[in-house]
Amino acid sequence: MLLSCDPNEKEGSLKLVDDLTRNANQVQQQILKEILTQNADTEYLRGFLGSGKGFDRELFKNKVPIVKYEDIKPYIERIANGESSQIISAQPISELLTSSGTSGGQPKLMPSTAEDLNRKTFLYNLLVHVMNQYVDGLDQGKGMYLLFIKPEIKTPSGLMARPVLTSYYKSSNLRNRPFNKFNVYTSPDETILCQDNKQSMYCQLLCGLIHRHEVLRVGAVFASAFLRAIKFMEDHWQELCSNIRMGHVSDWITESSCRNAVLGISSDTLIQSWLI
């Protein structure tokens, strides 16, 4: 199910959330119908339902078991090793998302499609409208959000395995996102996508300080990253001020796209560092 509304439009977004939650059972039944109809010919569902069954909710409930990750892991590993996505999905698997932590120490792999990424991006944009009912001003100014990518690996199939946030940051959904007044960041995309987390942190903090008069909120996806940012700022405070005063970026920032993005901001903004 692909949903649509303008993420900048508060009333329409809240109405969609209200409709989805008030009619949760109807929505769930529709989603189940779409999943079963679309994936009826996959190897996984055929193994339980047979061929050509189409949508049969009761047959699905009676025949398809509730599973743990270990039950579907062999299917996922086959796809990671190069077999067809049709094993479990009628849509092409575009990437494998990795879990952030497991009791066994090995991340779990979760297949994802392009449609899945679009849906998650859309639903993420709805969150702020709910939050804005309780916290005013989220559509004003800029957010100094510290966002980072993590390492990814290429599986034998050629599919990339990466954390879900890295998936979004490296996708065209971020690069080509339409303007959203609720999500105006101080960090250029190039600083978020920097492979070196130290350079990324420095440049994102530098950009946030340059735009400090417009910053109305700060944050990070994980609290640990925000705490690291505070310590990092303490350790590099004088250097940050010097860069702002001189309209310069430290020589150890060597990632070219990241460096150029920050220089483009600092050269257009004259700030007296003593004010910081």
Image (spheres, helix red, strand yellow):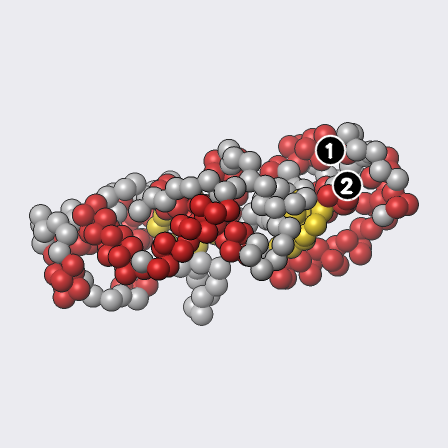
Residue 77 pos. (x, y %):
31, 53
Residue 210 shows which numbered tag? 2
Is there CB contact under 8 Å for labels 2 and 1? Answer: yes
Secondary structure under tag 1 reads: helix
Residue indicated by mark 1: 265
Q: Residue 115: image x %, image y %?
A: 35, 42
Residue for point 46% across, 51% down: 14
Could you say which quadrant of the image residue 270 lies in?
top right
Q: Nearer the viewer, residue 76 or 241?
A: 241
Which residue is found at the position 71% from the left and 35% from the top? 262
Across and down, in percent, residue 205 comes to 72, 47
In the rendered view, would you say 141 is above or below 101? Answer: above
| Residue name at image x 61 percent, y 57 percent | 135
User: Seen in the image, is 253 located left or right of residue 243?
Assistant: left
x and y, in percent, of residue 196 in the image: 64, 45
In the rendered view, does 127 fall on the left or right side of 198? Answer: left
Choose the circle earlier in sequence order: 2 or 1. 2
